[in-house]
Amino acid sequence: MPDSGSFSPASRLARFRVLTVCTGNLYRSPIAECLLRQRLATPPESIHVSSAGTEAVPGTSVAATAASLVVGRDVDPSGMVTRRLTARLVESADLVLGAATEHREAAVRLSPVRALSRAFTLREFARLVRAEDAAGLVDPAARFAALVEGAATRRGAVGAAGADDDVSDPLGASPAEARECVTRIEESVERIAAAMRVH
């Protein structure tokens, strides 16, 4: 039976898939991918993190571009190559995290039923996520599913404005602006990782 877009967070999931998205898949989404993979520190069979770009040229190496922005953060983007965002990638993801609103909207356009309740901007999701939504769940995949469901429910009820939910593209930006981009990604990743920890 086709997936209707709903899921049961209480059940044990085989693997939870997170997809980060930006425009070129050269800076923001691979950095978010690397940081999430590192901070979540869960077995790859439980949570799989990948990235794509709405206008990416497939197969381009991201090592030099992304690595220059994450020096000293113990993440290594070497070997990563760009991918173009497709409906198939969106439909296979349990959570889509866009660098900006335009990237979330692109995912929803590609797969409205699947992505509507599972696609957020990275900063939006970090703002809405609450550890208590996963209370009592130990399995990482089940915890993440519960966090997504809670955030989706909270999205319309939270009064905090979402005007600051975008992460600007560091391409062509000043060094200070590029550092700010990475800081905003890292702050969001830390909040998500904190919610994922079993207390």
Image (cartoon, rainbow, N blue to C red):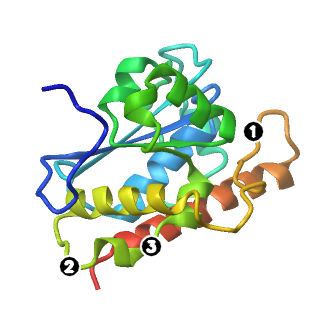
Q: Report the residue at 68% width, 68% height from top.
A: 159
Q: Is residue 163 visible?
A: yes
Count neighbours of disc 2 (C-alpha within 10 A) and say few if under 14, some if 14 to 19, many if 20 or more: few
Badge 3: how crowded within 10 Å, few (<14), some, or many (20+)?
A: many
User: Residue sitting at 35 percent across and 72 percent down?
Assistant: 133
The numbered mark at residue 161 is none
For the residues labelled 3 and 2, the Cα–Cα distance comes to 13 Å
Tell me: 27 left or right of 179: left
C-alpha span from label 3 to label 1: 27 Å
- How far apart are the alpha carbons under marks 1 and 2? 38 Å
Residue 72 drawn at (x, y percent) = 58, 62
Instruction: Give the residue type that dot 1 points to.
Output: Asp
Which residue ends up furthest to the front in the rendered image? 157
Residue identifier under label 2? 136
Disc 2, SS: loop
CB of mark 3 within 8 Å of CB of mark 1?
no
Name the foreground residue: 21 vs 165. 165
Q: Please state which amino acid type lies under the numbered disc 2.
A: Gly
* Disc with the residue nearer the chain's start (3 vs 2): 3
In the displayed structure, 85 sits above or below 4; it is: above
At x 62% / y 43%, what residue is drawn? 99
Residue at image mark 3: 130
Q: Which residue is mark 1?
A: 169
For the point 30% across and 62% down, which residue is it? 146
Q: Nearer the viewer, mark 1 or mark 2?
A: 2
Q: Which quarter of the image is occupied by the C terminus? A: bottom left
Secondary element under disc 1, as helix, strand or loop, is loop
**Which-is-in-front pick, marks 3 and 1?**
3
Kind of element beneath mark 3: loop
**Horizontal and vertical percent position of residue 104:** 58, 36
